[in-house]
Image (cartoon, rainbow, N blue to C red):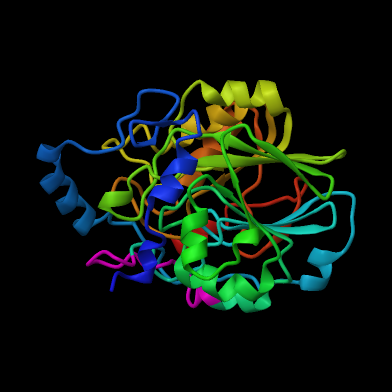
């Protein structure tokens, strides 16, 4: 029996729905720009060797603590949105009296089907779910294991009212027992209203898949959330390209942008952004306050130290006069919160 981790199989029924998307071509979803998503076969042995060896500072000196959630304060009605970052790309937010959770990968292993485990920097991360309030809306950007986690989705199931997901993710959730009428799929630039919040799925330059037979059989992207008072953008995974300017022109300016910044490497330069590119993407998209995400959870790249994404993002943001926040794990914050370089204690 195939592992539950793989998710839903791609039946003809699912494919017939995907074919209706302008982004589905020749049997898979495609990027807006020419993108190299696979490494050269001849490079593979060297890359695997470097990945197994890892970076000398690939992990923190001790487990990263997660602040206990002050649920009463988090749920208090206020004029400004509140956020909590749990490492990597997991973001909890309180927006317009709605509790929204993005990419809740709170499992201990980002490579559950690989021979070598990719352990989380924090101990017992799944226990965070026990402390969370009821989730009005759960957003998923794509189906990679470091964003869509079977154990997390299973544990969250009783707390979540509704799921907005990228086109192709529904089949995974259905296979894991989520009611089909609770799941809404999005193509790029599609917008839906959710309790007076306009939610748009924005394009990224990436790929997807949970196995060799499911490569790019699910769309990838980011999320923009707009109320009459605030405009928030979660960039999603992906390399730098011209689409960031279009996102800013069509949906910006953004009060805060949560920018992918981490797990970059010269061997896959077009599918993850380097820190200077993350800052430039925020500027392109007209982001007022930027926050680096996709770091602080796992070591998925042998090229950089675990803390380097935040360190370099901060340097480039200051160089280009971009306001930014770098909250610690579990800290409740808003766009005006003063944050520091907390990671230095764990270098």
User: In front here: 183 or 91?
Assistant: 183
Residue 233 in the image: state x and y as whole percent: 66, 40
Q: Residue at x 46, y 68 (%)?
A: 150
Residue 83 in the image: state x and y as whole percent: 71, 55
**Would residue 23 be visible to someone looking at this image?**
yes
Residue 90 in the image: state x and y as whole percent: 57, 58
Identify the image quadrant of the N terminus. bottom left
Specify the segment rendered in magenta.
112-126
Q: Does the magenta stretch include residue 70?
A: no
- The quarter holding residue 320 reads top right
Q: Residue at x 50, y 34 (%)?
A: 20
**Would residue 308 be visible to someone looking at this image?**
no
Viewed as shown, does residue 267 lie left or right of 273? left
Q: How many circles with numbers are drawn on the protein?
A: 0
User: In front here: 65 or 201?
Assistant: 201
Viewed as shown, does residue 316 lie left or right of 332? left
Identify the image quadrant of the C terminus. bottom left
Q: Residue at x 45, y 42 (%)?
A: 16
Q: Which residue is drawn at 46% across and 30% down?
A: 23
Viewed as shown, does residue 135 lie left or right of 44? right
Q: Is 242 drawn above or below residue 183 in the view shown?
A: above
Q: Is 127 drawn above or below residue 220 in the view shown?
A: below
For the stretch drawn in magenta, the main secondary structure is loop
Residue 250 in the image: state x and y as whole percent: 68, 23
- The quarter holding residue 146 reads bottom left
Q: Is residue 123 magenta?
A: yes
């Amino acid at each position: 029996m195939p592992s539950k981790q793989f998710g839903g199989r791609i039946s003809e029924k699912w494919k017939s729905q995907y074919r209706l998307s302008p982004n589905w071509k020749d049997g898979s979803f495609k990027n807006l720009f020419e993108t190299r998503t696979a490494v050269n076969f001849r490079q593979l042995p060297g890359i695997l060797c470097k990945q197994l060896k890892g970076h000398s500072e690939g992990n923190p000196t001790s487990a990263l603590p997660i602040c206990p959630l002050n649920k009463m304060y988090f749920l208090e009605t206020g004029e400004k949105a509140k956020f909590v970052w749990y490492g990597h790309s997991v973001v909890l937010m309180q927006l317009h009296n709605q509790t929204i959770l993005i990419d809740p990968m709170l499992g201990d292993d980002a490579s559950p089907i690989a021979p070598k485990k990719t352990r989380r920097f924090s101990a017992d991360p799944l226990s965070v779910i026990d402390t969370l309030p009821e989730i009005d809306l759960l957003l998923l950007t794509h189906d990679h294991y470091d964003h869509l986690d079977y154990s997390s989705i299973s544990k969250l199931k009783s707390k979540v009212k509704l799921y907005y997901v990228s086109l192709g993710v529904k089949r995974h959730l259905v296979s894991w027992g989520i009611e089909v009428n609770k799941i809404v799929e999005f193509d790029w630039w599609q917008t839906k209203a959710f309790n007076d919040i306009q939610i748009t799925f924005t394009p990224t330059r990436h790929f997807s898949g949970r196995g060799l037979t499911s490569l790019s059989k699910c769309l990838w992207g980011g999320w923009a959330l707009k109320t009459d008072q605030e405009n928030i953008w979660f960039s999603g995974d992906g390399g730098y390209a011209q689409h960031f300017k279009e996102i800013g022109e069509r949906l910006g300016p953004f009060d805060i942008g949560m920018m992918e910044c981490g797990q970059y490497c010269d061997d896959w330069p077009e599918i993850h952004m380097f820190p200077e590119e993350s800052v430039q993407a925020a500027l392109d998209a007209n982001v007022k306050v930027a926050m680096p995400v996709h770091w602080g959870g796992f070591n998925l790249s042998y090229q950089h130290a675990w803390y380097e994404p935040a360190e370099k993002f901060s340097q480039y943001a200051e160089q280009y006069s971009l306001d930014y926040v770098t909250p610690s794990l579990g800290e409740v914050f808003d766009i005006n919160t003063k944050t520091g370089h907390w990671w230095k204690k764990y270098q």
